[in-house]
Image: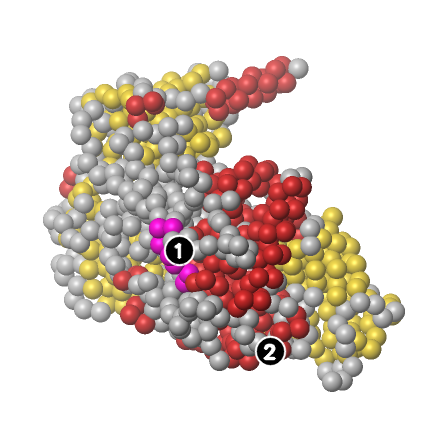
Amino acid sequence: MNELKKLVCILLSLIGMHTMQAEIITYPAEVTPGSWLCFRKEISVEKDASHNLLKIAADSKYWLWINGELVVREGGLKRGPNPKDTYCDILQDVKGLVPGKNTIALLVWYFGKEGFSHRNSPTAGVSVDLTIGKRRYISDDSWKACIHPSFYIPKGIKPNYRLPESNIGFDAEKEVAFWDKDFDDTQWKNAKVIKNELSGWGQLVERPIPMWKDYGLKDYVKVERKSDTLLVAYLPYNAQVNPYIKLKAKAGRLIDIRTDNYRGGGTPNVYAEYITKSGIQEFEAWGWMNGHQVLYTIPKDVEVLELKFRETGYDTEFAGSFSCEELFYNKLWDKSLRTLYITMRDTYMDCPDRERAQWWGDVVNELGEAFYSLDQNAHLLTRKAILELMNWQRPDSTIFAPVPAGNWNQELPMQMLASVGYYGFWTYYMGTGDKNTIKAVYPNVKKYIHVWKLDEEGLVVPRKGGWTWGDWGDNKDLVLLYNLWYSLALEGFHLMADLLGEKEDSRWACQVNERLKRAFHTKYWNGTFYLSPHYKGKPDDRAQALAVVAGVLPESEYSAIRPFFKQQYHASPYMEKYVLEALCMMGYYEDALERMKKRYYDMVESDLTTLWEGWGIGSKGFGGGSYNHAWSGGPLTILSQYFAGISPLKPAFKEFVIKPVFDCFKHVHSITPTKWGKIELNIVDELDMVVMKVKIPRNTKGYFHIPDRIKKYRINGKEKKNKKLEILKEGIWDIELYLLSI
């Protein structure tokens, strides 16, 4: 009973923790952008401190030490969940606290400027609320504070305006070990308390995604000396890294650290520099960078003792896979996954270099890829993105991306339609079953759907928004694209309305969409492809693809449009996903593979481990030509969903389709991760027979579509009557398919 009472007390204290907000503390003088602030406090703990709850928020990032041990590396998320509020971390049972005296030390990096992924506040500081048993310790003026003397902003070129982060300089001669328990902070000033309502932080919103995964310090694949002063360290793949160096030097030597991707996407990104002290020392750059190589520029008289890197990243596992006998498609799937992972952190990103921004054209592709490649943690980032997008909705009901953002507020109408529609929010629901999130954003989606107006024919009246962008590249038939993205948005809205019992909204969306589809086909179809009357460019492959996936093009016209996709190549890698999907939906799988190989050949054959923004890099690409761009991974989804043939029928893959393509590959192995377990498929073509092994997770059903070319088949050794569909429940199924010769 005593234990029960103890547990109840703990739970009550935890509940209370969520409802209380500590004040914000800052340095009691001017804090300039790019500053690093130190905070310290000694607390006394009477009894067992292992059960505790820590609520901590910062603008912009923080590092936490307890009793001299680093327990949180780069805490915090870029602001914010909406234009006003701030994320906070809630950490349970933080290690390192002991009975008696404890020293808590914090280092806070204040960006101090707006960016495409961050909304700045006027308050550089931290909010701390620690509960241990019945005791509560908060951020108040008893904390000691100072500006860290070692950190500075280098004098070189600043990162481009899209990034809120500064370059990081560190002077080791001024270093202070302020995290040590015995450090003397008596000369420090008492922290200044700022009332929450005056801070610009708004409310503290619990962090909705995991803390970062720390892979630890690792050795480079190899290190080459390129000159007397330049060392090039090779990473195993494109990664988010903190470069590390151990060295022996005289004082005052300057070391420059950046990656080969410093100008990724065409503009300056971030780098670090280090000024040595005398003797043996080590330095780790705490602002992450990305690339395939780390470039260390080191004076000749500095002795390098060790070079390493720390990889950090979003906390998710690579849980899915796809392979076949053709190496090209395996490499393409793997590079798509690497590209997806490196564009995940505080938010989904378009690229980890020039912008680190949550553009929703990218997010739509990313969230779909995640269902076939990553574990369930990944979908928390999608949920965060959905809530952010709609929580930033403006009073006029328009939405815009990227958000969070402090220096961008322009609507890209077609990206916004893609986000709220079938491939955006609805795909998220079908992959997760998260009805609560759909319910939360539904009123906002409805408002945005009704921002759009139709003409007397039932077609969309195009809206410029802030940036009339349909895709990179030329030959964009924007009138077609506007209408088709709106059709897909209506389809998603109708499905969400049905889910939530909003029958009137559902009927309206269906009626409007059916009228739009009829009018669109009648007005724009010329017998071979779609073309709007005033458009002067070459016919648009993007638009034709969207017409197929939106269900606008009748099946009777599939054969008419098929040659088009072997003649027109205008889509960027962003929209190429929909072209490939259209070919698969029409049943032209070999055409899809042929086009996939043609379009992605240079990327796959490149030594780079990620996919590019355009079909070339730099001046040969689009938008700056970054070599790691989220939207380019569409083939991952296509290969898993259509060629392995796994797609959800009911939310969270509770029931799913098994419809692999048997005529394109001799061998296919795929794993699709779900909340129930992994769907595993192995297919081997043995001349006149195809052998399949399927693993169905618990509490799920797989609907196996029998190909038309089947003479007979066996399941687990038992011959079956020729059906079109077999329902497979939990377990392992051995299937032998005997094919008729063509």
Q: Nearer the viewer, residue 557 or 662?
A: 557
- The picture places residue 152, in percent across and down from the top left corner, at 18, 42
- Considering depth in this image, is 261 or 249 the residue closer to the camera? 261
**Could you tell me if residue 229 is visible in this image?**
yes
Residue 350 got which mark? Answer: 1
Q: Considering only vertical position in the picture, is 589 above or below 258?
A: below
| Marker disc for residue 560 | 2
The local secondary structure at tag 1 comes to loop
The amino acid marked with disc number 1 is Asp
- SS majority, magenta: loop
Residue shown at the point (38%, 64%) measured from the top left: 472
Quadrant of the image for the C terminus? bottom right
Which quadrant does the N terminus fall into?
A: top right
Numbered range of the magenta stretch? 465-471
Q: Residue at x 48, y 24 (%)?
A: 18
Residue 591 percent coordinates (x, y): 57, 77
Looking at the image, residue 635 lies above or below residue 28: below
Residue drawn at 27 percent across, 30 percent down: 123
Q: Residue at x 55, y 48 (%)?
A: 425
